[in-house]
Image (cartoon, grey):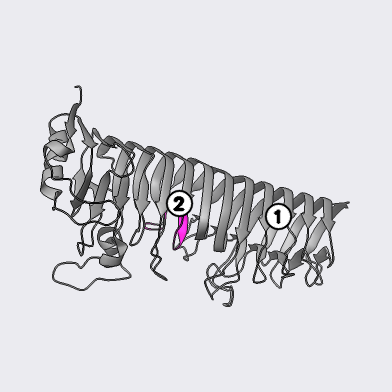
Amino acid sequence: MSKITYYASDYAALDSDVRAGGGTDDTAAIQGILDRALEHPVHLVMDGAALVGGLIFHSNTTIECLNQSCGFYLKDHVSMPLLQNSRQDFYEIKTENVCLYGGTYNFNCLHQEHHGKPEGRDYDEKSVEDFTNYWTFGFRIYGIRNLVMRDVTTVDQRTFAVMVANFENVTMDNIDIQLPHILFGQNQDGLHFWGPGRFLTLTNIKGTSGDDIIALAPDEGDSKSSITDVLIDGLMLREADQAVRLLSRDKGRLDRVVIRNVTGEFKSFGFFINPWFRGKDIEGNIGSVTFENIDLTQKNHKYTYSSPLLFRLGGTIERLTLKNVRFRSPDDRAVLMQIGGSYTDERKSDDDCPSNIGTVVIDGLEIVKNKNGSPVRGIEVKCPVENLVVRDAFLNNFEKSAFITLFEKGEIGRLSLDGVDMTGGELIDDSRGKIAVKHIRQ
């Protein structure tokens, strides 16, 4: 069945502004067009800006905005997603073939609550159900196959700009996440994904976030769902709090993930790769993750529970490969990589945070010398690591610490260093003799 094209201006006032809001409430008019997808495929052309109170889309829907001045502004005090799918399910896919092209989606964070209120009772902050149903996400999409978002700008997310769970074949390209109003400690993530999911492609993503700009958290909600086969290519940060979180807390598998071409500035954390939460049976289930061409600057550290860092690893990780990593101007005694220790707060004991790391390969590393002379902490090993390999590394700012330091519970089965050029400091601090085999070639 061929799709039918509808121009929004034929049905709605479109007298709003994607940056300032205002105008006529066009919710009913736009929703009326979207509901026609229940009968035939719909192509909605937004040729202006609509003030809306939350919209629901169905399978076989295309929403195309003619340019970035066209799109949607979420009206005040609705505290609900601007856009969500109609038949939401965490394990069965009931929505298919949806395309969002162009335009601006303004979530109006200053005039929304962090979460809605369940009818007849208080919101339960420990309830997964309340989190998934009542947090004020920008887009909320549960159970979708064949989703394409391209050339989309989001503005001022109240919590996550986009929340997707239970998906297959999702492509997002040239997405600009703009956050002029950052609210401290409010989880203003960018793109957040829960499993089960497979075949996720994110390209040319840029922006600012008040937490993770991208989070892959397959079993965060149910301790069992997996996400596999992921490509993130082109991530540009505008002082995001954090770049990417890879979270597996229990049985849910996160595997075959490639992240490359990441540039820009972050405030506190580059890449968290750990359970964050304690699992019920095992402590995470991460297979193979590869990073390539990382060039990041850390500045303006924001949080107190941890030092700023580029990588934190924890839980169960089979293999992590890093290629061509450049860490610019790390400030506030930033850490290159913490392996093991507390999943969340480095000030806390790691007794309840077991970690077992397989192979970590770093192939090409430069830590650029700080102009302000601030020292850097290198690789801090706080758990068993089977293999640690570092090749072709140029290191500055280690006058006060070793490049690799083993803590009380840290041990390395096989350490291989090849071509590590270091100014000042010691290469290895292994006072307890916890490295079984060393191969060092300068």
Residue 300 is at least partly visible in this image: yes
The label on residue 414 is none
In the rendered view, would you say 99 is above or below 277? above
Q: Is residue 94 left or right of residue 186?
A: left
Residue 209 painted magenta:
yes
Q: Residue furthest right?
A: 442
Q: Residue at 14%, 49% (x, y): give it.
A: 26
Q: Position of residue 321 (x, y in %)?
A: 65, 47
| Magenta-tinted stretch | 208-222
Image-quadrant location for residue 100: top left
Pointer 1 local density, CA inside 10 Å: few below 14, some 14–19, many at least 20: some
Q: Quadrant of the N terminus?
A: top left
Give the vertical position of 414 relative to 203 (above or below). Answer: below
**In the image: residue 398, left or right of residue 171:** right
- Would you say residue 57 sits in the magenta stretch? no
Image marks 1 and 2: residues in contact by CB distance under 8 Å: no
| Residue sitting farthest toward the top | 1
The image quarter containing residue 211 is bottom left
| Mark 2 crowdedness (10 Å alpha carbons): few <14, some 14-19, many ≥20 | many
- Does the magenta stretch mainly form a helix, a strand or a loop? loop
Secondary element at tag 1: strand
Name the one closer to the observer, 3 or 18.
Answer: 18
Q: Count the labels in the image.
A: 2
Q: Is residue 315 visible from the viewing direction of this image? A: no
Residue 310 percent across, percent down from the top left: 62, 60
Q: Which mark is residue 252?
A: 2
In this rendering, the answer to whether 441 lies above or below 43 is below
With respect to residue 391, does 67 lie above or below?
Answer: above
Mark drawn on residue 386: 1
* 352 horizontally vs 330: left or right: left
